[in-house]
Image (tube, rainbow, N blue to C red):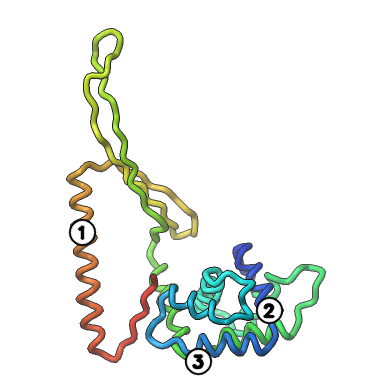
Amino acid sequence: MTNLIIPPKHIEVLRKLLTKDDSTIDLLVHKLAEINGNMTKSFLKECFSSVKQLADIESNLLASVITGLYITKDGIGISLDEYIDSIVSSVTNTDETPSEHSKDVLRKLLTVDGDLQLIGKAMRLFRARDNVLGSSQIVTDVRPIFSDAPGCEITASTIIHTLRLEYKDVDGNNTTFSIGIDSVDIKELRDALDRASAKELVLKSQLATTTLKMVDLV
């Protein structure tokens, strides 16, 4: 059996999901099957929050869990039955016997007809790069400039910026990278970001004229 590493928060969500009755799971599957074209994570969150029987599960965490299941399913390279057994084994306490109901719930969630299958494939493409950005921040400081004379008086000041990027590397480790930048660098970064946004809009408008579906991972 394949050993899966599942985040603790996701394990909590899965344990709650696996105890839901068939009617609740069928309703959730129905909602997932309705996904068509609009596949953003925010849309998934709204989709899940509309299932009142899942009110005890945070919708954003549920969205992460469902998409995570499909991402792993798409690239793990094992049969669906073995994948389900591995998930159940990972979330079941050692003194418990995995139930057939748990397996049935996972099978329903992992065999949804519709566009949900595309999210896993799209996310795998997104994460196929060596480093994936997690967050960014620019820290701005005023630094004093001291004289060389005895007493070290402050004679001037300057403004400096530090760009901090937190990213996940190819091994899944969170890493922070910092680099000093100035006002010219900020303008160049802004221009590059604006150009990237403009190119994305052009590509989306062109793709809208085709039969291809857009998976927007934001």
Q: Could you tell me if residue 53 is visible in this image? A: yes
| Quadrant in which the C terminus appears | bottom left
**Which of these two is toward me, 166 or 183?**
183
Q: Residue beneath label 3, please?
A: 113
Q: Residue beneath label 1, please?
A: 192
Label 1, residues with CA under 10 Å away: few <14, some 14-19, many ≥20: few
Residue contact at pointers 3 and 2, CB within 8 angstroms: no
Q: Is residue 101 left or right of residue 95?
A: left
Report, in whole angstroms, how far the alpha carbon at label 1 lies from the one at label 2: 46 Å
Q: Residue furthest top?
A: 150
75 shown above or below 139: below
Q: Secondary structure at mark 2?
A: loop
Q: Residue at x 49, y 74 (%)?
A: 45
Dot placed on the residue nearer the N-terminal end, 1 or 2: 2
Report, in whole angstroms, how far the alpha carbon at label 3 lies from the one at label 1: 39 Å
71 shown above or below 79: above
Residue contact at pointers 3 and 1, CB within 8 angstroms: no
Q: Residue beneath label 2, please?
A: 18
